[in-house]
Amino acid sequence: MIKFLVYSAILLGIIAATQLMRVFELASELKGTRHYEIKEADNRRNGKLMFWFMVTFMLFCFWQVIKYKDKLLPVAASIEGVELDWLLNFNFIIIWVVFIITNVLLFWFSYKYYGRDNAVAHYYPHNNKLEILWTTVPAVVLAVIIILGLKSWTTITAPADPNMRIIELYAKQFDWTARYAGTDNTLGGFSYKLITASNPLGVDANDPKTADDFTVKGEFHIPINQPVEFKIRSRDVIHSAYMPHFRQQMNAVPGMITFLHFTPTITSKRMKEITNNPNFEYLLLCNKICGASHYNMQMNIIVDTQEEFDAWLKKQKPNLSAAPATADAAEIKEGK
Amino acid sequence: MSDNHGHGHGEHHGHGHDDHHHHQETFITKYVFSQDHKMISRQFLITAIFMAVVAMLMSTLFRLQLAWGEAGEKFAFINYMLGDKWGKDGVMDPNMYLALVTIHGTIMVFFVLTGGLSGTFSNLLIPYQVGARDMASGFLNMLSYWFFFVSSLLMFASLFVENGPASAGWTVYPPLSALAEAIPGSGAGMDLWLISMSLFVVSALLGGLNYIITVINLRTKGMSMTRLPLTIWAFLITAILGVLSFPVLLSCAVLLIMDRTFGTSFYLSDIFINGHPLDATGGSPVLFQHLFWFLGHPEVYIVLLPALGMASEIIAVNSRKPIFGYRAMIGSMLAIGFLSFIVWGHHMFITGMNPFLGSVFVFTTLLIAIPSAVKAFNYITTLWKGNIQFTPAMLFSIGLVSTFISGGVTGIILADSALDIPIHDTYFVVAHFHIVMGLSAILGMFAGVYHWFPKLFLRMMNKKLGYAHFWITFASAYAVFFPMHFLGLAGVPRRYYSNTAFPIFDNLMDINEFVSVAAIIGAIAQLIFLFNFFYSIFRGPKAPENPWNSTTLEWTNGVGHIHGNWAGKLPVVHRWAYDYSKPGKSKDFVPQTVPLEDGEHDGGEHD
């Protein structure tokens, strides 16, 4: 019944609107005007609207920036992140300038040159000097942007130093596991064919390098001011290891090992003070659509001081060597 | 060359139309299996409008979820639209959320802004503006529409299969899209998605080849390439991009069909899912991404260029000025078209692709900013000292230039691989591409509908409703997408069903509410357009021959739809398309068919 009423109301609404339009059109026909023709009054009204839109739009943008600038991510917590934030701000200055100048000119000209009945437009088909100017100026600015960007990109993605601490991030629907490489700082081999309920990462228990490896879930620890290299794997679909507070991200791709490395610079404890939020935690999020619980696939990252980290490390016990090994030796991949 | 109406479409020297009065049309050949470009263009437009309404309803649903649903509110509307299976008690199912964003994206990108935009306006304007009697092949053109129609039908039908439609995101990355165990939508819904897209590629190719051939071969006497309106240049370059890139999407889809159905492993390797390891080994999910984005990036310009081309024309007509830098505009479009083929890797900086390769893509991508900047400045200079007539089409075109700039500048950040690391796949990306590609193209499409409605349906749309439609749409569009930049900079990932699963994003919830309110206002404003559109088709005032005082050929053939476009001989062109307010002329426009006076320079020639 309600559905019927809703549909009837919609239908009646459409009929009413049609009839109103008809009345309006008949009225304007009687007045002898063709209502699709653009009058000077229309131009003036829309020109003014262009001007006021510009003012409102710019104020809206600035208001948004002021409103949200302190609610964005806190200060970058890694060396790489600090560099990227600087670069991002540098780029933002350029694009804000371009954005404001061009939008203001666009709306200002729309207002200033709204059509008047007796006005004639200025015939101005081209001007080579102007066009060369606005080809070369963007080219120069972009050259600067490209050079600075690639400089950061090459440093951040440079091959990891072999001495860096190695941690594996293992993704599956819908959680993360971190595997530490142990005292030898080398991960044991693995194969997806070894995966069982008791060996969720498919590690090779016969590999001597596995003996000192251990895994953790829910949260993992890293020490401050020490570079860490993450080796990222996936069991099923593509996931993405996203660590926004460190400004780091890398996809987890089944069949591949991907890498990223960074140096954390602020402990979790200190960050709680900086953000004035006692519940603050660094997060590892999944940032590639991976299924129903994609939105809820995260892990906490704890950045410790060296002493805290050493104490935590002592408590961790190798927990992988008991896993049964049944796969064909040829299928086992090196953990390196 | 096809010659199925009994006269040579390609005749340049005129070939009286009255020699085939015997031509009989039945209802079927006129309205259904029509080979007339004008009818096909209307068919594309109406189909696209239907699909756009579907996609818009979807966005309304997931905006309800993002603003209030995740905070525990229940909506009878969600239950009404999705039923008890996907919206039990008014709470959206997480899988359905992913299905909605997936199909919303697919429909908007392909069915509305590719099929709808190129299909409508290339079909309508290419024969009209080059002075041809129809497309080179009316038959292929008809097939192009019907492939599009079947493709749309399949995509729409996929919404109703038991396990829901494709849900792996509009980019359908495998393995998620390849394995029904990974997500319910990767079952029959994904099969339909792939078949539908394959047919879509066929449609795009048939259409594209026809557009190219028509522009190259069927230009009327005097219509040199440098006298073509910029619309035609845009459609031509778009069609070339489509013909070169859509086949790659087809191969990409076919390989995925093989992986899903025939046990190959092009994209699959070392996967353990649902308690067992898969046999597939040796494939690479990254291969799919290369193939997909080899189409996917040119696709952005396939969507954007027709809108930019139409805006060039509409801005010139309504500023009553020649487009500034006609040749620079052509050059920019060619440069954008060329570069669009060598930038696809900027979607893949953090997929594990070699970082050096990433650097190359940074360079090529940022180069695109140069021709884009030239275009933006040229539009602005065209307005300068104009005598601007604010038709609804003009408003939408100016809106397009604004969104093209506002969305384009954030592209500079995303193209910079280093900066892409922290903001990849966040709402910053959502904001960027919705503004630069989505808004610009849809505003361009509206501009085209308002401007060429008299040629499409021989009647005029209501101006005041057009104004209301523009201002509400434009304001709400910025209100929807501008704040999303901040969500992205706060690290909010896209495609999250809920942001309240953990506390990090709690202080940003008011952005989502603001955005959703604006989105719903924007959606309701589209009712104004739909009413105006359908009302005017039947009851709008009859259009005069040349309502906007334009110079181009489509306004020279009277007030009816004529089979063969011009009664009698085809028009002969004597000048470029942009003689507006030329000094020394009695009127402020000189149609292309008016011969040059003694000693008069053609405006298209640089002096």
Image (cartoon, coloured by chain):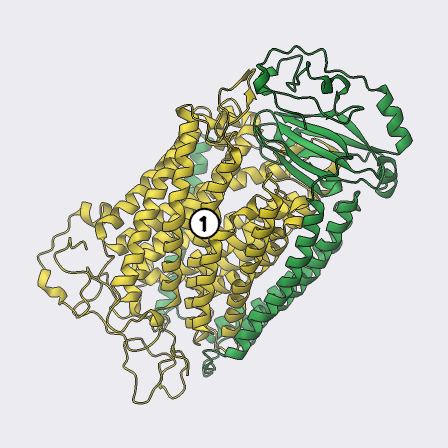
Chain colours: A green, B yellow
Q: Quadrant of residue A95?
A: bottom right
Tell me the crowding category of disc 1: few under 14, some 14 to 19, or many 20 or more residues within 10 angstroms, Cα based: many
Q: Is residue B272 above or below residue B25?
A: above
Q: Is residue B142 above or below residue A237?
A: below
Q: Residue at x 15, y 60 (%)?
A: B8
Of residues A28 and A79, the one nearer the viewer is A79
Q: SS for tag 1?
A: helix
Left or right of A88, for residue B393: left
Q: Is residue B198 above or below residue B16?
A: above
Q: Residue at x 51, y 71 (%)?
A: B378
Q: Residue B18, position in %: x, y?
A: 11, 65
- Quadrant holding the C terminus of chain A: top right
Given the image, on which type of amino acid does mark 1 rest?
Glu
Q: Residue at x 41, y 86 (%)?
A: B583
- Quadrant holding the N terminus of chain A: top left
- Report if residue B442 is visible in the image: no
Of residues A101 and A182, the one nearer the viewer is A182
Residue located beneath label 1 in the image: B299
- Report if residue B29 is visible in the image: yes
Q: Quadrant of residue A226?
A: top right
